[in-house]
Amino acid sequence: MTMPNVPAVQEEYFEDQPTGIEHEVEEERPPSHPSVHADIRVTTKQFSLRHLMDLIEDRGLELAPDFQRNQVWRPSQKSKLIESILLQFPLPAFYFAETADGDLRVVDGMQRLSTIHSFMRLSGFSLSGVEYLDEVEGATFDELALPWRRRMDNTQIFAHVIDPKTPAWVTYNIFKRINTGGTPLKPQEIRHCMSTQRSRDFLKSCTALPEFDQATGFRLRNSPRMDDREVVLRFCAFRLLGVEGYQERAQGSIESFLMEVTNQLDDPKRVDDATLDRLREEFRSAMVNAAIVFGDHAFRKWPEWSDYRSPINKALFESWAVALADLTSTEAEDRAEAIVARARHLMSHDTRYLDSISVGTGDSRKVAHRFTTARDVVKQA
């Protein structure tokens, strides 16, 4: 017996290590917002490094805390950046996004600013492996001679600042296009950088639940590409807005949908604290029930002829987590055998269902099909 004609399961890798997440195969789509040029509002401003460091200290410029990839540069790379500043080499322009409160968030240049801040304000490292300025080798910022410290303080940089009136989805697309890191940021990494502490703390609290670790086999703990935060966000998005909300807002793009929900989680007027608490408990319940029903194969493709433990599939995660969230643990235990049998049959023989969790998973028809299917399996078990 063979699988229906769908793409083979492929796991994503980051820095030569498996992530535990199945690679999503997305279909190319035409732009959802053809009039984007009318919504772009960007100005160019000049800042001294001392001013930027003060803004960071005063929380007027946010470096997206808890973003693990901030610290990927090697010591030699950090030292060469500082040496370039001391030599007065011009730095590439930065991109910031301004909030309605006048605060700034880093869109492009986070690694450079994090390195400069670490050196100038945190004594985070000493210079090593400089090429031209032997006299500063081994020095921290405080150990530099006064003229060098003044040179760094007074260094001017240029930043393109995105106006707060620019729609969030436009800012998101600017972020995607201009980010110049060596490894392109994934959508959840971009959303993290654009969001506020409220949604970050909420998503992190959900990923810290032991029930989440249990349901995912500890595979997503401290995910290097924030896949753990994304699957929680997907659950919350569909619990809050449902498939109907996806069809109304997303225009076939899961990224647009998740950005919209991130904005809602950041706004206590749209999603209050009580709703966040309820979502967290519903998520906890979903994780408990997924572990009861599917065991080690929760949120993974599991055809009838194989017990191989596939990587976690995001489309399976969002649809089954939502479908299982309203069951009690006793109901999950009573229905587990029937749910597993039906789900494995679907993953073995139903090409339409497999297509809905494998290729172009953002298509609204496929979203509706996989959610409806999971809900009906749970209901009829």
Image: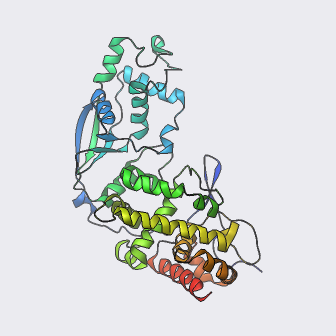
Q: Is residue 81 above or below residue 339?
A: above
Question: Where is residue 37, by image quadrant?
Answer: bottom left
Question: Where is residue 352, by image quadrant?
Answer: bottom right
Left/right placement of residue 374 relative to residue 252 reads right
Give the percent coordinates (x, y) of residue 165: 21, 56
Residue nearest the observer in this picture, 96 or 33: 96
Q: Residue at x 47, y 40 (%)?
A: 70
Give the percent coordinates (x, y) of residue 248: 35, 77
Q: Residue at x 46, y 43 (%)?
A: 181
Question: Where is residue 120, by image quadrant?
Answer: top left
Give the percent coordinates (x, y) of residue 222: 57, 50
Residue nearest the observer in this picture, 267 or 33: 267
Left/right placement of residue 10 relative to residue 27 reads right
Is any part of residue 359 visible from this angle? no
Picture quarter with the N terminus = bottom right
Is any part of residue 64 visible from this angle? yes
Left/right placement of residue 4 relative to residue 24 reads right
Give the percent coordinates (x, y) of residue 218: 64, 56
Q: In this view, does 192 lie above or below 51?
A: below
Q: Which residue is drawn at 43% across and 78% down?
A: 243
